[in-house]
Amino acid sequence: MMLEDLEPYIIENTIITGDFNASIKEWNSESSDKRGRNLKKWVEKNNLCYIPSTLDFSKRSNRNIDLSFTNIDEVRGETLKMDTSNHWSLLISCENVGFDKNKMFPHVNWKAYEAIRMLLQDFWTNEQNRGMQVDEWYMNYVRFLAALKVRLAQWKEKEKFRPSLLPYLIQKLKEVKIIRNKYCRERTIFNINEETRVLLRVLSREVKIEIAKYKSSKWQDFLSKIQEIHDNTDRAFWLYLSRIYKHKSLPFSKLDTGKTILAKENEISDELYSYYSEQFKAQNTDMSDPHENQIETEYLELMNKLPTLNEKIEKTNFTDIKKAHFKAEAEKIIWIRCSI
């Protein structure tokens, strides 16, 4: 990603952090390079400030290339020496930033998304054939898909949160997580944690058994409702059965065959089945083609020789031939080693 691609996302109270692979002396590196100087110009152009940290992030070199920038006042960075793969962690703190728990969630109309994408597919194909650069075409197409998703999204407030597990199971999972983190820390620092390891194993097994029992009981309750006797047994049965088997309609309502327009679902299915069945039928041999003529001649000669052979010939496939080849190679290697 180019730096210019980030500019539309820089608004008020923005924090940008990541591996920029650029070093500057003023940013706790031993030397400055070309990428670092270009990055510094871009930061100054967008009115951003570098967030200094207490130590370098990298464990393997003295180049400080994991950088953070912001346009928020009084932001502090602290390097945490917590065990990670190649870099230390960065803790960013600020008194001017608050967090709101947003209960609004997007609901995208995926059927409309699919329909619009199919309608405009010819347009994007023509744009590519017109001579546009592949990278430019791909970037425009991705932006179009992102904009289409945003346009078809409706934000709705979630009425209530219903976790799939009971509260006491969620609490047990939190306790297991605490013990697991403790076990990882002790293993890294002391390398002796037999008691914690046994405790983690016992708690994990208990939670796993409890969750399995809970899911089994929920499933049994669901089945028992189906078996219950109601005033209208047929209605109750089909009501619960419909929750398992949901009919999925086609993503389109009509099909243009070139001669007529089909609107019924069974007619559309039959037409598509007939079309693709024709596509996958074996083609007739073109004897005017010298290559196909040669292949057909050799095939007939081979088939004429097969009845005269005494050995039994069975059908095989590429996978069986490959396995037999590897087995023969292995036996050959073993024989050579034994002879030596």
Image: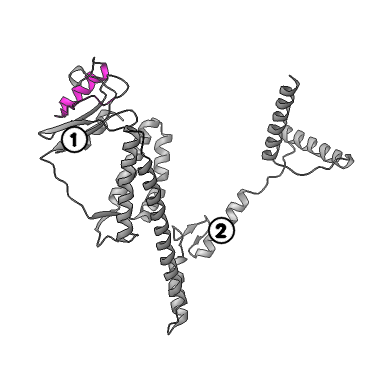
Residue 271: numbered disc: 2
Question: Could you tell me which quadrant the C terminus lies in?
Answer: top right
Q: Which of marks 1 and 2 is in front?
A: 1
Position above or below: 208 against 146 = below
Element marked by disc 1: strand
Q: Where is residue 202 in the image (x, y as percent from the top left)?
A: 40, 50
Residue 51 lies in the magenta stretch: yes
In primary-sequence order, the first of circles 1 and 2 is: 1
Which span is picked out in magenta? 30-58
Q: Is residue 70 among the parts visible in the rendering?
A: no
Q: Is residue 63 left or right of residue 288?
A: left
Q: Mark 1 points at which residue?
A: 92
Q: Is residue 118 left or right of residue 159?
A: right
Q: Where is residue 319 in the image (x, y as percent from the top left)?
A: 66, 39
Question: Could you tell me which quadrant the N terminus lies in?
Answer: top left
- Give the residue type at disc 2: Glu
Position above or below: 278 against 329 = below
Inter-mark Cα distance, 1 to 2 = 61 Å
